[in-house]
Amino acid sequence: KLRLAIGGNKLVWNSAPEEGDLDRPMETPKNFDNSSVYGLYLQGKNYISFRDYIKAEEKLSACLVKDPNYAPALCDMAGLKIRQFKYVEAKINAGRALSINTYDPAANYYYALANLKLGLISNAKDGFDIAASGIEYRSAAYTELAKIYFINNEGTKAAEYAEKSIVNNQYNIEGLQLLALIYRRQKDEVKAKAILHTINTIDPLNHFVHFEKYCWDNLLQSKTLFTSQIQSELPQQSFLELAIWYYQLHCNEDALKVLSIAEPNPEIIYWKAFLQNKPVDVSHIQTGTDFPFRDETAAVLEVLIKTNDQWLLKYHLALIEWNRNELAKAKALFMQCTDQPGDPNFYAARAALMNDNAATVEKDLQRAIKLDPQQWRYSKLLAEHFITQKEYTKALDIAEIFYKKHPGNYIIGMLYAKTLLLNKKYPAADAFLTKLNILPFEGATIGRQLYHEAKLMQAVEQIKKHQYKKALQFIEQAKLWPANLGVGKPYQEDIDERMEDWLSYTCLTKLNKSKDAGLLLDRIISFSPKVDNTVRNFLPANDLITAWAIEKTGSMEKATIWLQGEAKLYPGNKVIHWALQVFNKQPGNNLTDEEKDGEVRIIEQLNN
């Protein structure tokens, strides 16, 4: 399910079908047209469900280019624009959807939210009223109306709409919280505590309940109970969540009361300064431990920066702008900080954002390493930067120096092995991987992939030297799954060994063992690439191997048709399209270094 926190409410939709690798929607026909209006919309919904809002916007934009009046895409685009604080654009998108269907609940809801943020309360009320006609938006719309009336000190109407929101969704926690707050304002302790009891029954871990009890009696015991229940890894976020909820209802005293209880971190200090209209004291703030992400905090920082030129405020605002994909604003804020910060995280973040300026990236990462030479992440980032720039020797030097100082760090060890491979030091990489111990972790296949590449690259070298028996030895070793590399061997039917079979076929053919070689071609062709429950059983580059095998046993035309079918089935997979271009000897078949995997590099080495 997809959950979007907009305007303080949680809206829930069924998400688009999951995908194996986001190439095509699952549960759709194999010949599904991903470039159609509906196909692009479905992909956009899917990316929203994965919280990849940048790609979601790309797909929805492409959908609206094809059909500017496709209402579902207009509504989802309005939601994305609200997330980006682009309320005028959100209003335009929702308004266009309303021009198609005035009573569209989704369009009315987003139209209302946009108008609410723009301060156009009458329009917001109209939108929420009509949005409530749709069952999926009814509870959320009534909650928003209740909040509007509460802010306008219309307690009776606020209570009326809060009760309506609960009628349509008895588990609407925010509606219940609003009722409890209304009753506290009306000093109706009996009703308030009855609502708090209901909330506690539904959500026993709800911190609002304990804070409201503290607001009623102001006893130290109640305060201690409230704070003792916050046991999360980032407790300040629980305090902030609650304080911001009160602030959005113009209950600034309650918000400040929550924050005064919390252990201060930068974000809490910002909010307290904002609510009290006092200067920000950053002298005691510990940097490098907090990374603000809240939209509400962005608005607070924008106010504070007007009277405070501290780099930390600009850095934290830049992080939020970056998260909203406002890259120009984020870059400007980062650059305004110059080289004042003494926090290595700042330089690592700026290097990641300024990835289009190689000199700035290198300088910032070097500065981060100087500030914290023991942190492996900065050395890893610098080595990966040199890999991106195809400066493989520099990458090897960085990885090797750090790994020799920290031989227990298997993450840098894997990077060291990769840089050895990129520098074509295949025997050295092979020997190193026999000694590297990788702790198993989720998706821990990198070590085995490096081992596989090291063995097959040596096999290719032996083939080029006409040492076919030696090559066959390396190929057999490549099929192993060494226990020290952090991953167990899958079931045999889930292993794609088409590359090994093709190299073995090449060797056996040269050794005049045509019968055995022919069996390998049959095995390559019989392999069936598939995605099962989002898990892919094949390596995309190996589709080129299958095409070569079909060409050997059939015709180039059959091979092309098969490979075109794979490319159509997975239109977003660049490696399969690369394979099709290589097979047809078409120009412009280059992948970036980041897009190449070991199989691609092996094929390139084989073809050189």
Image: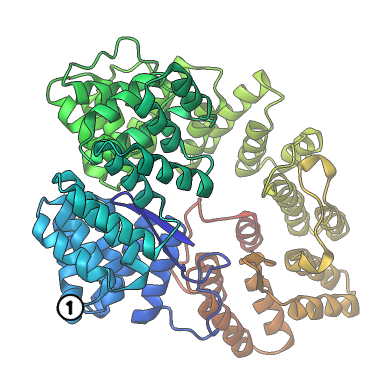
Instruction: Identify which residue is drawn at 19% across, 21% down.
Output: 276
Label 1 Cα neighbours within 10 Å, binned few <14 / some 14-19 / many ≥20: some
Q: Quadrant of residue 45?
A: bottom left
Instruction: Identify which residue is drawn at 16% across, 73% down.
Output: 96
293 left or right of 575 in image: left
Q: How many marks?
A: 1
Q: Quadrant of residue 329?
A: top left
Q: Position of residue 161 (x, y in %)?
A: 26, 58
Say which quadrant the C terminus sits in: bottom right
Q: Quadrant of residue 193?
A: top left
Task: In the displayed orientation, state which residue is furthest to the top.
Answer: 283
Q: Is residue 333 above or below residue 88?
A: above
Dot 1 amino acid type: Thr
393 left or right of 328 in image: right
Q: Position of residue 108 (x, y in %)?
A: 22, 68
275 left or right of 384 in image: left
594 or 243, nearer to the observer: 243
Q: Can residue 296 be spotted in the picture?
A: yes
Q: How is the image coloured?
A: rainbow
Query: Callout 1: helix, strand or loop?
Result: loop
Instruction: Identify which residue is drawn at 82% across, 55% down.
Output: 489
Q: Is residue 401 above or below residue 574?
A: above
Q: Can residue 363 be spotted in the picture?
A: no
255 or 511, nearer to the observer: 255
Q: Position of residue 597 (x, y in %)?
A: 60, 55
Instruction: Identify which residue is drawn at 28% across, 69% down.
Output: 106
Q: Is residue 25 above or below residue 170?
A: below
Q: Position of residue 534 (x, y in %)?
A: 62, 66
> Mark 1 = which residue?
102
238 or 588, nearer to the observer: 238
